[in-house]
Image (tube, rainbow, N blue to C red):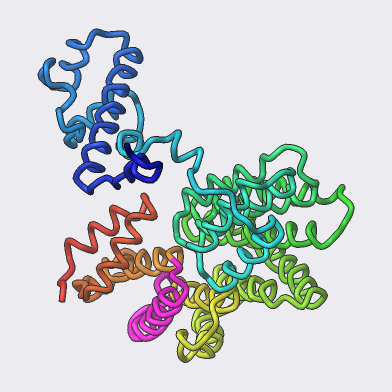
Amino acid sequence: MESEDQRQEPPVRPRSRAAETRVADHLRRQRLVRMIELAQSYLGCSKTQLALALNRDPAKVVPDSGNPKLDLVMGLSDVLDWPAGDVAEALWIDPLQEALGQEPLPQESFEELNRLSLRAHREGDHQEVRRLCGQMLRIASTPRERGLAANRLSVGFDQAGRYAKALEWARIAANIPDLPSASRLLYMANLANAHSMMWQLHEAIGVASTVLNESESQTQNDVLQCAKGVALYVAGSARRRVIAEQPNRLPVDGPLAVRQLEGAIVLLEDLAARRSDDSYSGIANSCRGGLIELRVLLGEIDPIDGVGRLLEGVERITDPQAVPRGDWLESWGWWAVYGLNIAVRHLRGDDQDRFAAVFSTKAHEIADRLENWAIREQVFSLEHSLKSGISTDDADKRAHWVLDREDLRTLLGTMGRFPWFRVTGWRILSRATLV
């Protein structure tokens, strides 16, 4: 007769890697079958008609492996009117499992997670920011907590250079019902900034203008002052960038952009002093650099004088790796971009070569320290303009690119993050020598 110990259930053996792969393939095949059925319903056709539309054998529309080839993904993209990447994601990842999350609830309180995520943000650890904010969202119980978590998650994606996701979460934060009015306007200001990072300049100006208009009738406090300061910075910077592409808008947008950046400096420096938070001063410093470029565009400062002033600021950062990450270091990276803007668009000959080389090098160094993809995109685009002779008549500017392994990694990362940059990226690669 067996004892109680002998009758115990045998231990559950963990699945082998091969078994897990088979399960994953089976689930993907089920999702592909479901996607095929949805495509039939969307078109209102039979399976045979769908197979013809996809240029597939009706008996083999769904591969046994469950892993569709690229032609099937592209065909479903056309049939469903979905972006190809969204089709691939829906086939590869279960969207419901992703949404529900399987991790246990965190043991920390919301306020403790908030404190940790803020520290991770200031240290530039965007992966930790996103991890902590995901936990904050799972236990958030009030509009204030949900807004705070969504907004900081947007910031975490922004730090990682995933600007489309940052825009998505900034929009979520700004649209949470029953938020305190000042918080909603601050999240809208951050939404304007997310539009700006995606080069959606008119949208950025529009959202920022809404913040400024609505803030006039609100009771003033620090949160509202921050919202106004950020909105002025975004609106002024976006107008500066619009002017560079549409010079005919300079007479109207130029003076307005100057006033907005000057207003942002006043509000942000006041917050920095009263709250003993240097990050506000860092954003204000970005405004000062933008004002120099604007005044060059307006003819108030000679281009050589403008690049000289910007260079004087940039040269304070001798070794970016020795400088703490944060808004101050980022501001000097933008000063380098402003200087490169002026050099490419307003200088010629040796002056252009000399200043462009200095600003380009410094901007790349600071971007590498911060992992700031927005700065990288601007520098690559301006360097391409310079080397392609788009902004100059000098034939010798049409030089080939020389890229090492790290340059190539950075270029490919930039192409992945900014859809509008990909054509420029391919042009750079077509003329590059890889070393």
User: Who is closer to the viewer here, 89 or 236?
Assistant: 89
- Tell whether 342 sits left or right of 383: right
What residue is shown at x 40% (from left), y 84% (from top)?
358
User: Who is closer to the viewer here, 41 or 181?
Assistant: 41
What residue is shown at x 21% (from left), y 38% (from top)?
22
What residue is shown at x 59% (from left), y 62% (from top)?
237
Instruction: Examine the rendered structure and indicate whether residue 356 appears above or below residue 421.
Output: below
Count the numbered circles shown.
Answer: 0
For the record, the magenta segment spans 343-372
Task: Evaluate whether residue 193 shows in this view.
Answer: no
The magenta stretch spans residue 202: no
- Tell whether 225 sits left or right of 354: right
Residue 270 location in percent, x, y? 80, 73
Q: Quadrant of residue 48?
A: top left
- Tell whether 42 sits left or right of 321: left
Image quarter (top left, top right, bottom left or bottom right) of the C terminus: bottom left
Q: In which quarter of the image is residue 64?
A: top left
Residue 134 location in percent, x, y? 56, 51
Instruction: Examine the rendered structure and indicate whether residue 276 appears above or below residue 174.
Output: below
Instruction: Examine the rendered structure and indicate whether residue 244 appears above or below residue 76.
Output: below
Task: Considering the whole magenta stretch, tell me its main secondary structure.
Answer: helix
User: Who is closer to the viewer here, 86 or 308?
Assistant: 86
Image quarter (top left, top right, bottom left or bottom right) of the N terminus: top left
The magenta stretch spans residue 365: yes
Residue 97 location in percent, x, y? 44, 37
Residue 180 location in percent, x, y? 80, 46
